[in-house]
Image (cartoon, rainbow, N blue to C red):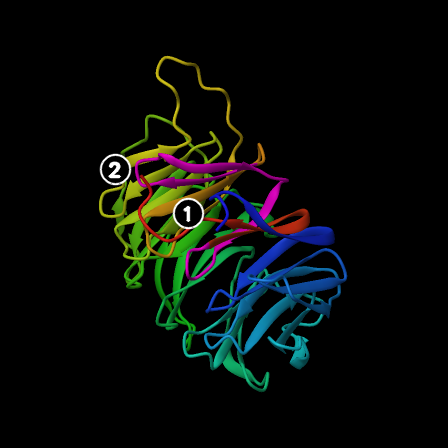
Amino acid sequence: MSQPGTVALDVQHDGTVQAIAFSPDSTLFASGGSDSVLRVRTTATGTAVDVPSAGFVSSIGFSPDGATFAVADFEEVSVRNSSTGSALWHGPVAPGTSVNSVRFTPDGRTLVAATDAVVARFDAATGAPILPWITVDTPLIADLDLSRDGARVALAIDERHGGDHRLAGSARVLDLAAGTELGRLTPDNAVFAVAFSPDGSLVLCCAADDTTRMFEAEGGAQLWPAEGEVDDEVTAPSCVAFDPKGRWTVVGGSDGFARILEAESGVERGRAPKLAPGLPDPGFGAVTHVAFSPDGKAAASASIDNVVRLFNLDGKEHYAVATDEVLAMGFSPDGRWLGLGCWGRALLIDNGEPGPIG
């Protein structure tokens, strides 16, 4: 077994890698982006399956049984065989509109695809549209999350790109099948990211008004921070995630820190990187990606100073690895690997055997 933090697989690309995904059994790793080939590799041996692309792969998602994977590639969505890469079906969501995200529902029967303004559903086996679709009145959809049961979708809306260029936005929760809105939170500026709690009852979001907020999915009532409460530090948060049990959250900010917050209260437990006592802040680069390990005992962050960190809930580092700029990041379902999409390559970092981080 390699040392934790070792790059176990380096998949070369001819352009940026903006999308990565693991199969449910963690044996396959897919990566794609701005070049003309989407690459699927086995995590154990690196055995290759290459799939032609239009050079605009923005999202990849495996089906729950791992037999197929979906691809958002410029204006098209496709579902492909995981073993051969052959397309089972493909087609546009809306002609002339780029597709930004693809997700399978937990039962594997439905594929959810999102553009800047539309959340569409397709029969995963045939590609037949499932109506109604969700249309956002003022785009842009900056982020999307599905509840674990596949019944609800949370949207981060950035209205700065609308026709009137307002400095506004919202976090919205909608019934995926009916398209009806269940809850909405409206900060003072664009919302960048959203994440459902594991039970789907809460949504964490961060916004361009320098706030991170927790609210109820049903009704939109804000739980924290309390009305009028302002953080002592402005962290300019841009990425968020829940731990698998819903007890903790991780938030990445432009000040270079990833903070572990208690989900119930928003109180900080730890942060990474840790500063040595008495030394000045070295000026860490903004955190652009965060994620929790599947066992919830560790979190990972990537920042624009080209460092990826794995750390425990108190912020103690397990490793720090120098990389190229990270454009996509995620854990394998078994927690063994951390996948990265970078400029010119995709990487698998070995996290070591599962277990607590000291």
Q: Quadrant of residue 230?
A: top left
Amino acid beneath label 1: Val
**Outermost residue toward the front in this view:** 1
Q: Is residue 329 magenta?
A: yes
Residue identifier under label 1: 240
Packing grade of label 2 (10 A; few <14, some 14-19, many >=20) is some
Residue 299: give x, y in percent of width and height. Answer: 39, 45
Pick the residue in front: 317 or 266: 317
| Quarter of the figure that contains the C terminus | top left
Magenta stretch: dominant SS?
Answer: strand
Determine whether, in the image, residue 12 is placed left or right of residue 30. right
**Is residue 54 shown above or below 132?**
above
Q: Secondary structure at mark 2?
A: loop
Residue 267: numbered disc = 2
Horizontal side of residue 226 vs 27, given as left or right = left
- Position above or below: 79 against 206: below
Q: Position of residue 226 (x, y in %)?
A: 24, 40
Tag 1 secondary structure: strand
The amino acid type found where label 2 is placed reads Val
Question: Is residue 269 visible to the viewer in this orientation of the structure?
Answer: yes
Q: Position of residue 25 (x, y in %)?
A: 46, 69
- Residue 244 among those drawn in magenta: no
Label 2 to label 1: alpha-carbon separation = 15 Å
Q: Which segment is the magenta one?
A: 307-336
